[in-house]
Amino acid sequence: MSTVNASNNVSAEVVKKEKPKKSMHVYAVLFFVVCLGAVLTWIIPAGKFDTVKDPVSGITTYVPDSFHLVDRNPQNIWDVFLGIFNGWTSSSALIFAMFAMGAWIKILEDTGMIKRSFNKLITAMAGKEKFAITIIMLVMMMFGSIGVKPTIPLLPIAVVLAISLGYDGMVALIMMHVGNGLGFSLGPYQIQSVGIAHEVAGLPRFSGAGVRWGIMIAYFVMMLVFVFRYMDSIKKDPSKSLATDMDASGIDLPEIAEGEHKPTVSDIINIILNVIGFVVLIYGVAKWNWGPRDYGTLFLVMGVATGIVAKMGINGISESFVKGCQGIVYSALILGIAAGIAQVLNAGNIIDSIVYYLSKPLENVSPVLGANLMFVINGIIDFFIPSNAGQAAAIMPIMTPIADLTNVTRQVAVEAYQLGGGLVDMIIPTSFSLFACLGITGVPYKNYLKWYMPIFALQCVLAVVLLTVLQIIQWGPF
């Protein structure tokens, strides 16, 4: 039996699926935060900072010690809904770029190219367990670093691979979810996090990519140490497996892939086509100052071209396009709702007041300590807004001026957001994708935390070291 066919039976082998505890939907959380923002406009004194625009960079910054009170403009319930709608319209280019990205990913997925290529990879590496898992984790991390999350559809294949190599569902979870999560959370070209944060902070899009590549690779190497330790431990003693909710006895193990599951000529052409697309994307944002309209258009071109090469037909491409947009609605609309928070605070003339009062406690601490406090704050906020795009849109309008007033560089402030939210993303109980993956792999949440929390602690220590060094060297451009 082929790997792909075998993988279809995996979900049925999970005896019990871990489910996240009932919690308030993130949309509801954000709506109440917008409402809270409106309430605050009746309580917090309205105020403004003077600002100055750099004639060269075009960046607007706050003038220290220029805060002054202005007339109140308290917001009512109508203003709450108006703020949300204005959040969508003001973020429309980015929202539709995300829809285009979702459509492209779905078209790519529906060609079958990813599964066939992945199947070929894993069957070609039998007997080279650690090397194979390292390569797969690296590939998944690269996917995540540009905002692509094929984890759930590929995870059943990974479970079959892990078990066939003598491991368990936890190893499958690690190489797919954890590998992809590292890239998704820390990637230098992640549109839903760094892209949005740079837009809000007024930084050149995807600037500082070299440093972020280094940070992501450092975390990847750290992760491999723990992955290999776990693999060695369950090889020696299978009773130490953390996938205690999976019965692997009925799973058919893979043989060498059958002909129909090998990458086709169109797959190879599409791989080349999409690699070229990524190069154009990176060059466009780095050299041509591309924004959401530009890379959104590129996603459209890549999606349609991929479908044509795969001979999906106009109806097939259209159906996949719609499904892809449906899959990204959750994240795309979150962006607008989160942006509504800043809309209400701005309309009520209190966002500068919040910045002023939040920055006061940081006046007596060094910029280094301030950068690390931003890391902690972003980590806490991630529990309530478990969305890269939503958190960037909600918190960066406040963090950016605080960074200016406390002499923390904006690039460091963005990194504090990325590390704080990204690392916490891997453990929060409000993550749908985490619990979906736990269910497929038969790993209880408590077992996952038992393995991951020591890694998380080390990751946080490394984050503090990195932010300290980056702030000391005044990582920028500003």
Image: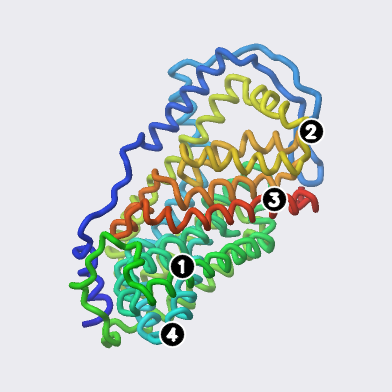
Query: Label 1 crowding class (10 Å Cα cut-off): few <14, some 14-19, many 20+?
Result: many
Closer to the observer: label 4 or label 2?
A: 4
Residue ID at (66%, 12%): 71
Placement of 136 over or under 94, stated as above or below: below
Relative to 133, say whether 47 is above or below.
Answer: above
Q: Does residue 225 appear left or right of residue 427 in this picture? A: right
The answer for how far apart the CA atoms under marks 1 and 4 are is 18 Å
| Dot 4: element | loop
**Label 1 – label 2 distance at C-alpha:** 43 Å
User: From what the image shows, is residue 289 above or below residue 78?
Assistant: below
**Decide: marks 4, 3 in contact (CB < 8 A)?**
no
Mark 2 to mark 3 CA distance (whole Å):
27 Å
Distance between mark 4 and mark 2 Cα atoms: 59 Å
Q: Are marks 2 and 3 in contact (CB under 8 Å)?
A: no
Q: Nearer the viewer, mark 2 or mark 3?
A: 3
Quarter location, residue 295: bottom right
Mark 3–mark 1 CB contact (< 8 Å): no
Mark 3 or 1 closer to N-term? 1
Sequence-first tag of 4 and 3? 4
Asked whether the viewer can see residue 200, the reply is yes
Please state, as top left, top right, bottom left or bottom right, where the N terminus lies in the image.
bottom left
Point out the tag, 2 or 3, that comes first from the N-terminus: 2
Residue underneath mark 3:
467
| Along the line of sight, the residue nearer the viewer: 133 or 453 | 453
Provide the residue designation for mark 4: 128
Badge nearest the viewer, 1 or 4:
4
The amino acid sitting under disc 3 is Leu
Residue 115 location (% of width, % of height): 34, 73
Q: Name the residue carrying label 1.
A: 140
Amino acid bearing label 2: Val
State yes or no: discs 1 and 2 in contact (Cβ < 8 Å): no
